[in-house]
Image (cartoon, coloured by chain):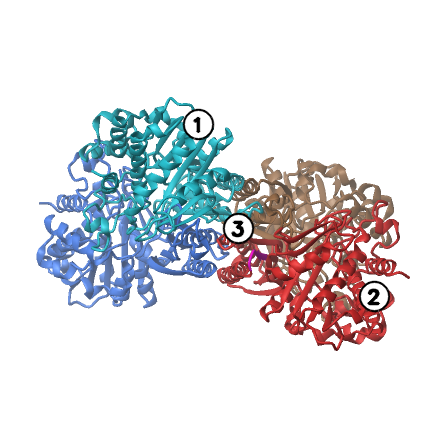
Chain colours: A red, B brown, C blue, D cyan
Amino acid sequence: MQLEEQMIDWRRDFHRFPEQGFLEIRTASIVASILEPLGFDLQLGKEVMKEDECMGKPDAAKTKAHVTWAIENGAVERFLPYFEEGFTGIVATLDTKRPGPTVTFRVDMDALPILEADTADHTPASFGFRSTADGSMHACGHDAHTSIGLGLATLLAEKQEELNGVIKLIFQPAEEGTRGAKAMARAGVVDDTDYFIASHIGTGVPQHHFVAANNGFLATTKLNISFTGKAAHAGGEPEAGKNALLAAASAALNMHAICRHSGGDSRINVGELHAGSGRNIIPNHATLVAETRGETSDVNNYMKEQVENIVKGAAQMYGIDYSIETAGEAVSCKCSDDLAKRLADIAKHHAFIQHVDVTSEANAGSEDATYFLEAVQQRGGQATYCIFGTELAAGHHHECFDINEDALLPAAEILFAAAKELSRTE
Amino acid sequence: MQLEEQMIDWRRDFHRFPEQGFLEIRTASIVASILEPLGFDLQLGKEVMKEDECMGKPDAAKTKAHVTWAIENGAVERFLPYFEEGFTGIVATLDTKRPGPTVTFRVDMDALPILEADTADHTPASFGFRSTADGSMHACGHDAHTSIGLGLATLLAEKQEELNGVIKLIFQPAEEGTRGAKAMARAGVVDDTDYFIASHIGTGVPQHHFVAANNGFLATTKLNISFTGKAAHAGGEPEAGKNALLAAASAALNMHAICRHSGGDSRINVGELHAGSGRNIIPNHATLVAETRGETSDVNNYMKEQVENIVKGAAQMYGIDYSIETAGEAVSCKCSDDLAKRLADIAKHHAFIQHVDVTSEANAGSEDATYFLEAVQQRGGQATYCIFGTELAAGHHHECFDINEDALLPAAEILFAAAKELSRTE
Amino acid sequence: MQLEEQMIDWRRDFHRFPEQGFLEIRTASIVASILEPLGFDLQLGKEVMKEDECMGKPDAAKTKAHVTWAIENGAVERFLPYFEEGFTGIVATLDTKRPGPTVTFRVDMDALPILEADTADHTPASFGFRSTADGSMHACGHDAHTSIGLGLATLLAEKQEELNGVIKLIFQPAEEGTRGAKAMARAGVVDDTDYFIASHIGTGVPQHHFVAANNGFLATTKLNISFTGKAAHAGGEPEAGKNALLAAASAALNMHAICRHSGGDSRINVGELHAGSGRNIIPNHATLVAETRGETSDVNNYMKEQVENIVKGAAQMYGIDYSIETAGEAVSCKCSDDLAKRLADIAKHHAFIQHVDVTSEANAGSEDATYFLEAVQQRGGQATYCIFGTELAAGHHHECFDINEDALLPAAEILFAAAKELSRTE
Amino acid sequence: MQLEEQMIDWRRDFHRFPEQGFLEIRTASIVASILEPLGFDLQLGKEVMKEDECMGKPDAAKTKAHVTWAIENGAVERFLPYFEEGFTGIVATLDTKRPGPTVTFRVDMDALPILEADTADHTPASFGFRSTADGSMHACGHDAHTSIGLGLATLLAEKQEELNGVIKLIFQPAEEGTRGAKAMARAGVVDDTDYFIASHIGTGVPQHHFVAANNGFLATTKLNISFTGKAAHAGGEPEAGKNALLAAASAALNMHAICRHSGGDSRINVGELHAGSGRNIIPNHATLVAETRGETSDVNNYMKEQVENIVKGAAQMYGIDYSIETAGEAVSCKCSDDLAKRLADIAKHHAFIQHVDVTSEANAGSEDATYFLEAVQQRGGQATYCIFGTELAAGHHHECFDINEDALLPAAEILFAAAKELSRTE
């Protein structure tokens, strides 16, 4: 089978069996089973993930239930010991034994909590690779990313004589909610890296276009906040209660009232608030699902600190307890100009590419690959985040999201070309 | 079978098969099937309930599903046509054809949304009459009330020669949440009544005690409030959203800040607040489950008006829509002194009763029987709300709630004695 | 001069020269100068006031400025050393040297911050005794109370042969805002008292009526709250500020949202909020002038504790400092039934009195004489708060307030009769 | 006298007699008296100001009182009829009668409500030209701007043979608070203008530096908001009140919680909140002094609309009235690139200038000259806002603010050079 067909097959297989963050057990086992025979040295699971830096990870019961599903749906069982607790990261290393720099690529593997469309005009449905896991969907293209990572691996293995130094591939879990990268970065997986390239498909960049450096990511923190008060009968003895709902309402209002920052754009959202257990009971529990963002990590940290002050203050107001859990986090980034220019030049020479932007400042939400960029740059390396344009059937995170698979092979080839050129840097 | 045993059997049967408000389909059909052969003239369902005054009634789908359950669990099918839409009220009339006043008694039939305890020390569990409907429970004694109503009916039928005038029995649905009485009162079921007695068991009054008039009910309004805004991506284009969560938070805070009233005690509770659909989405929907109370109907109406102003204002603040549904309501009441004294005298002569209070001002929450009291008093009749003491295993609305069944027969006998004496009033 | 004329003269003199709380320097010096020649043993100023329990006392500069005014307007200079720092309480003792109980009477002396009406139909204006101190006015009748106290003293002195035991008169400063009584009670001035009577004129009780025991006082706490944040330019660097205005706004809202108490009526009012110094400056300062009340001291303490939690929480939310000053306080009270009945009997025999109520539960605001009642009752004595009805030209605290002076002499005579009878109690 | 000395004299005179917005009566009369003999055609007061577009204008009493001050301090009386109502704008026109474009310059004249420093190291104090009007101060350099305008006028008059077309000078009142420009722009004073240059001194740009185009102005709206409720006694009958303080607190909180805008930076500040009249009175009045800002006028308009919704909603919540007054407003602007480049070139050739920036995006607060830029650009003309660097003794709006007067003459000369070159544009 030709690589292009193979990549499409991979992508469609992952699309049929989407797995959400820290549950990419089937996916990771298949990725590992493909990389191994290609000659990569594999590090799996906890070897490449700092356990206590995993954010918003499902609990053991949910993970265990998912293992069953994964096995039933084709997980490669000999890799399960590495992944079955939900630490689903992979680092695959190809050491040419020739002198040269370390060049690292990162793709992500997780799906979203979305029920996929089932209409005739939705290609995955009509072509038979719609999600089989109701409520989970690859609606952001990470199925394609995983496929591109495997295509790149195939090319690297086939043509390793053209390379120098060390090439590393990171298959990251739980990018959605910006939950997984930090655990891998803190585990040191890029601490040897001289050149780092993360990539995404789509994001509004048209088919045949390429952006070598996307700088528009906002730093972000995802916060799960809870207040615990005391229930009481609202008619009989209301003063015996401690009202968690009002603490939450007051926190939500004051969080949105956090002062704007002159250092750059900021965002705050209390996306969900759930409180109380009955009409005539003083509410003794409340939860808020929130996020902050900042144009820079400083601005985001400012937002986060204000949230902490406000939540603590709201709990104090009502004499109740609170907890704040960080359920996801990402920093901001500034891609390395030199690397961006080199990558832009490489992409220009690929026949599929008709237009190249060296850099884009377009706001593209948040991304936790920024942890890798930050770590590489802090040790003196160069790092960038590039975007492969593709045609989208609907926007990211939409139930009808779909990509044009023509973009898959060129993406793998451009990344291979980058590996080749960068690894020969003296 | 002796009446006492029969009443215990009835009570335990209703306890096993609890039905929540406007779903008392099995219960009502059995009640009707018992009353009919006793010679009562029955008016059922919509005949005795004003449809559009039923508050917080389950929707058609839920009602239909419950009919199936009711049939499977022993509902008397020939009465289903009257009750199957959830209009489950019954008025049973015994006309002596002798001159005399109309004396009306009211009991309620509905259960609560509580999962009953299943421990060895919980009598219904150990004696085999624990609720078979998970999540529904007679935890307020309405099973006993229905049984008392049937016991009273039996005595009235047996001894109708001792009576004059007209005796009416009201079996009311949906007292919990104060949702059902208004629809029956507005249908005119007490418009002919000269003497009215509603009764409750327990409420902290000890076994062998009797309270002839309880005045401590607070007027109340149950409100379901919803806000509908507009969703938007909280990072990308937050200003395109219209935030229903913040409107709800602001409404909740300001509702609790409604000014105290010098005319009497008031209460406000936002018991539940649910808003939003995801961390990074501007919340476009929010619901509040709330209630107001007042020592008088005037105070409660003041609270309700402020709530309406606040909700409207909060919607205006965020440029969104809102709705306010009245999901229950009750007025305050003042029992008729003369009737209370006569009833107290009657109770004193019953061997089971060791202590009688003519009136109690103890705050006993809210009750929609007050609509009947109000209607009877407005037409010049006398009305009271009496309490039969009993031993409680745990407080009302507790998962271990249970009564001492010794109180059942005496309650029916005292009410019969009242019927006898009052019906002979010239 | 007859006592009646003398009392009217006194009252009008005090009315012309009203002095607010802790500034009754002229008033107290004149009171002392009248009591001394009557043979009373005087304790003055700090002897009878615990300095650090004086609440909301004006600062030294304001007090000093007022001393000048007092001297210019007829203060008796030889008493100034006792009062010139603003400790203006007086206890006057008449010891009969005969066995018998200690009977204590209390009147208050301070005026209100109100600009008195200057219209032809306002008697003080047309009769030439309108306030000469713009912005201060005896609009609550304390001028009359002081006059009654002096009238009583005159009678006691003249007829001391009719008395037994010890008679004490307390002339209290700063009743308005409930600021002065606690300092005197804590100084122990009623620690020897067997019978205690405080009195008020008016309050809606009609001329010729008398209430022997008023129980309707709410416990209260007056609070001055301030928040101190940090200023910053609202356009250039808003995040450098710490917003005291928003902390105050949040505190005010949440204070009003304090849960109702089932133990009795409560009140909360943020009467004033002042914050900020300019449109484009993040506000660095905010002050709230607030009060809580409760039907019982327990309820008021509950309210006060919630306020403290809320203010602390609001400061925490915005990372700022706060302070809470108690600017006044009063407890609730329950008059002694026996004393009330005896006093009612005494009043009935006075020719001026046509109607007597032993007790009244009418809400009459707050009063700090309750500290004396509490102290006397705690040591086993009896205490009451009585009201002498009078005709009012306008309500208390109104710029047109005025009394009917016919009520003055009867009040002094009834109190004397009480002193006589109570002092003879064995 | 040489022009340089003259300009310093003018500047010091204006500095000694500072006049706040719409009160520049002395200043304007002196400006007019200087321009007239130079041969300019003058349009004064209401001729060049749309009355109802003047924002935040002092009331008639304040204006009248200031006229007296102005006369006492050297106002040129023959011009008072034009200015005495506070419409203090001037447009001076020099028509060369030769073909050519219309070139317009704008300076501003008003002072700030600041008490000037009186220390030895503050040059205006030690050199004897400190403000004589306590509480008013030229702390932003508008005294220098007026002097530069007069210096430019002098050069234009002297060298008018070197010019073509029409040259116009605008002396604008009330720039502080962005209150005066709109009224002049709406009166059409730049509707004939082909080239427009506004200028400022300082703002952090160093001595010998020049910025030809400053784009960093935020659009802004200054809002005075008031709520009117109903007073009531907070203890006796609190429910009779309508609480304006809580409406204001709720409005303030929700205004700060207005959602961030993805279209650019925004700002909101409630700089002052004053509410209530006494501790025990339900507050019946509240005022907020607020401002919004936006990186673009669209963003500012969005902020302003949200404020209006929130204020209306808060009033609705509490059943009270409200008013919103626009007390100042400015739009955003984008300087014309071509004009900026030409002006930069001109400035480069002046000996005093050592460094030129064509454009600056530095946030420089808000400026209502933007109304003129907008109007000129909308009719097809070119417009820019330039900055003359100078040494500052302290920042703008600081009580020790002072400039280096060496920058005055070069500024006038550069503007003259611009007039010369631009007027010769074909």
Q: Do the dots labelled 2 and 1 sit on one chain?
A: no
Does the magenta-highlighted stretch encompass residue B178?
Answer: no
Q: Do the dots labelled 3 and 2 sit on one chain?
A: no
Residue at 58% of width from left, 69% of height from top? A378
| SS for callout 2 | helix
Point out the residue furthest to the bottom here.
A97
Label 2: how many residues lie within 10 Å, few (<14), some (14-19) or many (20+)?
Answer: some
Q: Distance of mark 3 from mark 2, alpha carbons?
A: 45 Å
The quarter of the picture where the N terminus of chain C appears is: top left
Q: Specify the quadrant of the image occupied by residue B388.
A: bottom right
The relative height of residue C383 versus residue D88 in the rendered view (above or below) is below
Tell me, yes or no, whether the two marked residues, 3 and 1, touch with CB atoms within 8 Å.
Answer: no
The residue at which mark 2 appears reads as: A69
At label 1, which amino acid type do we have? Pro
Tally of marks:
3
Q: Read off the magenta span.
A: A292-296
The residue at which mark 1 appears reads as: D101
Q: Chain of mark 3?
A: B
Q: Chain of mark 2?
A: A
Question: Residue A186, how many percent across, how many down?
Answer: 63, 72
Q: Is residue A282 visible?
A: no
Q: Distance of mark 2 from mark 1, alpha carbons?
A: 79 Å
Q: Specify the quadrant of the image occupied by residue D176.
A: top left
Residue at 29% of width from left, 47% of height from top? D406
The relative height of residue D319 versus residue C303 in the rendered view (above or below) is above
At label 2, which amino acid type do we have? Trp
Query: Residue C350 vs residue B408: left or right?
Result: left
Point out the residue furthest to the right here.
A1
The residue at which mark 3 appears reads as: B253
At label 3, which amino acid type do we have? Leu
Question: Residue C269, how many percent across, how many down?
Answer: 41, 50
Does the magenta-highlighted stretch encompass residue A293?
Answer: yes
